[in-house]
Amino acid sequence: MVIPKELKYTKEHEWVKVEGNVATIGITDYAQEQLSDIVYLELPAPGTKAVQMKPLGTIEAVKAVTDIYAPLSGEVSEVNEEVKNSPGTINQDPYGAGWILKLKVSDSKELGNLLSSADYEKLLGEAH
């Protein structure tokens, strides 16, 4: 299982990479593994307001349907059309081509509420 050190994480298994005031968001390798084959995504339109740790969309997989939570507050600036058209991309490359959406971050202090890679690894260790 891959947990890139440079990313931040939520307890709900989203990852976030912040560059300037733009946050790229996806689900973790652990999450895609638990879901198994992802078949459909319901994503917000650009311009949608996101509130930290509130649902922002859903992922449907063969095994379950789950919410995508906003790791940070802001405004959706871009949705990955590739994963909307080919959701299985998330299973193959959750940290690369499988990114889900981008947000314009409204409060960078919220980063302090997220988990480091070490904290996320610890969380997963406790889950087993």
Image (cartoon, rainbow, N blue to C red):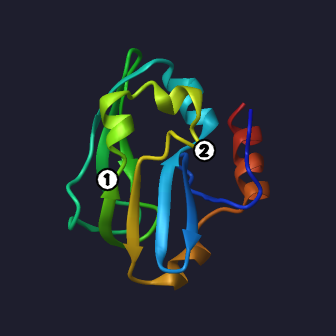
- The answer to whether residue 19 is left or right of residue 41 is right
Question: Image quadrant for the N terminus?
Answer: top right
Number of callouts: 2
Which residue does the numbered mark 1 point to in the structure image? 55
Badge 1 density bin: few <14, some 14–19, many ≥20, Cα 10 Å: some
Camera-side residue of 122 and 108: 108
Q: In this view, does 48 lie above or below 120?
A: below
Which numbered dot is residue 73? none
State which mark lies toward you, 2 or 1.
2
Q: What element carries label 2?
A: loop
User: Eyeballing the image, is 11 above or below 60?
Assistant: below
Q: Where is residue 113 in the image (x, y as percent from the top left)?
A: 57, 72
Which amino acid type corresponds to the residue marked 1 in the rendered image? Answer: Pro
Query: Image quarter for residue 56?
Result: bottom left
Residue in the picture at 71% in, 62% down: 116
Task: Calculate the distance from the C-alpha at mark 2 to the C-alpha at mark 1.
Answer: 20 Å
Amino acid type, label 2: Tyr
Quadrant the C terminus occupies: top right
Residue 104 to residue 59: above or below: below
- Element under disc 1: strand
Residue at image position (40%, 61%) is 102
Residue located 55% across and 35% down the image: 31
Query: Counting residues from the N terminus, which is met first, the one under dot 2 or under dot 1?
Result: 1
Q: Is 47 in front, or is 125? A: 47
Residue 19's place in the image compared with 57, above or below, is below
User: How far from the left and from the top, in percent, is residue 5?
Assistant: 77, 56
Q: Which of 12 and 108 is in front in this view?
A: 108
Q: Position of residue 52 (x, y in %)?
A: 40, 68
Residue shown at the point (70%, 47%) measured from the top left: 123
Q: Name the residue under label 2.
A: 95
